[in-house]
Image: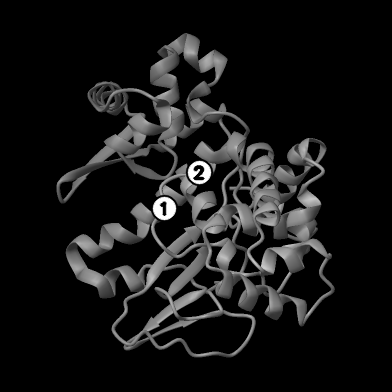
Amino acid sequence: MWETMLSLHSLRQQNGGLVPAQWRRSVGPKLPRSTGLLTALVPSKGYFPDFLTPATPLYDADEGLDAVLSTPRARLRRDLTLLAGGQRLPPWTRSLAEGDGDALALLGRAIEAYHEAAIAPYWERIRAQVDHERLRVSTPMLSGGTEALLSALPPCLRWRRPVLEADYPVDRDLRLGGRGLLLIPSFFCRRTSITLLHQDRTPVLVYPVQHRLLDEGPAAQGRPSLAKLLGPTRAAVLEAAEGSCTTGELARRVGILVSSASQHATVLRNAGLLTSKRVGNTVVHSRTPLGSQLLYRGTVPPTLTEPGR
């Protein structure tokens, strides 16, 4: 739900960088008319209602939508009253604030249609980049504990014990009080971190991941010329090994069994196209420079933070 709502910011921001611009050009013609209902609730910048991004762990878009539509009436009224204080809202939101069933159903259909057009076709790529960030920051924790994880966060977050400092649009303090902190790396989060305005739930900190080129469709499509050389599945495994990932992540990205992913990774490693190292109880795979040259025919695609690499 964070990716869905934050992507609405990217729709209207022209200075978001190469990858969001590529995504906007692709999804623009496909957006349903009901997207306007969502942009009324999610302005181009600033506050949008907390209830649109449930803080409890969820595992798919359907669960997220169910959580949004199950928001208690008091929370709907609180969040929408706050939003109305900074902008003019359409009349239907008054019914939404009262928990009206028809208004909630209208919101649900709008979220579902927008997600299907703008997020679902790219979800595997988005999740792969977020998973790469999770692995990047969690690997140091295996040897150095929580402090090592906090020290590995991107530059917009700085661990200075006992305070985690974050680039943020306004000056505020978030005191955890023993409640812990849910860290959420996000593809559509831009520049600065984000948290919920109301802190009556689990404290959440959403922060941006480093972008890589985003193509529509599953990550396992592979490149035709490389597929002829290596075979389609092995070519897809090589392409899926973007950044660093475990054998299980390789299998999920390509859509094959873990045992099959392990066998293909072994062949690619023996050919000098992948490197593998054991981290705790898992094996982490990365493409070698030779593997990247073979995949991209001598050029590596630029990233947002490494132009022209």
| Image coordinates for residue 48, horizontal then vertical, percent | 66, 70
- Residue 23: image quadrant is top right
Of residues 146 and 197, the one drawn nearer to the viewer in this rendering: 197
Identify which residue is drawn at 35% across, 61% down.
Answer: 137
User: In the picture shown, does residue 63 fall above or below 57?
Assistant: above
- Judge from the rendering whether residue 249 lies leftward or rightward of residue 30; answer left or right: left
Residue holding disc 2: 62
| Image coordinates for residue 228, horizontal then vertical, percent | 49, 9
> Gap between marks 1 and 2, in whole Å?
9 Å
The residue at the far left in this view is 281
Of residues 257 and 119, the one drawn nearer to the viewer in this rendering: 119
Identify which residue is drawn at 69% across, 80% down.
Answer: 82
| Residue type at numbered disc 2 | Asp
Tell me the element at label 1: loop
Identify which residue is drawn at 45% across, 11% down.
Answer: 229
- Judge from the rendering whether residue 283 lies leftward or rightward of residue 199; answer left or right: left
- Judge from the rendering whether residue 46 lies leftward or rightward of residue 144; answer left or right: right
| Image coordinates for residue 166, horizontal then vertical, percent | 50, 80
| Residue type at numbered disc 1 | Leu
Of residues 243 and 32, the one drawn nearer to the viewer in this rendering: 32
- Judge from the rendering whether residue 198 lies leftward or rightward of residue 278; answer left or right: right
| Image coordinates for residue 130, horizontal then vertical, percent | 46, 51
User: In the picture shown, does residue 42 fall above or below 299?
Assistant: below
| On-image quarter of the N terminus | bottom right
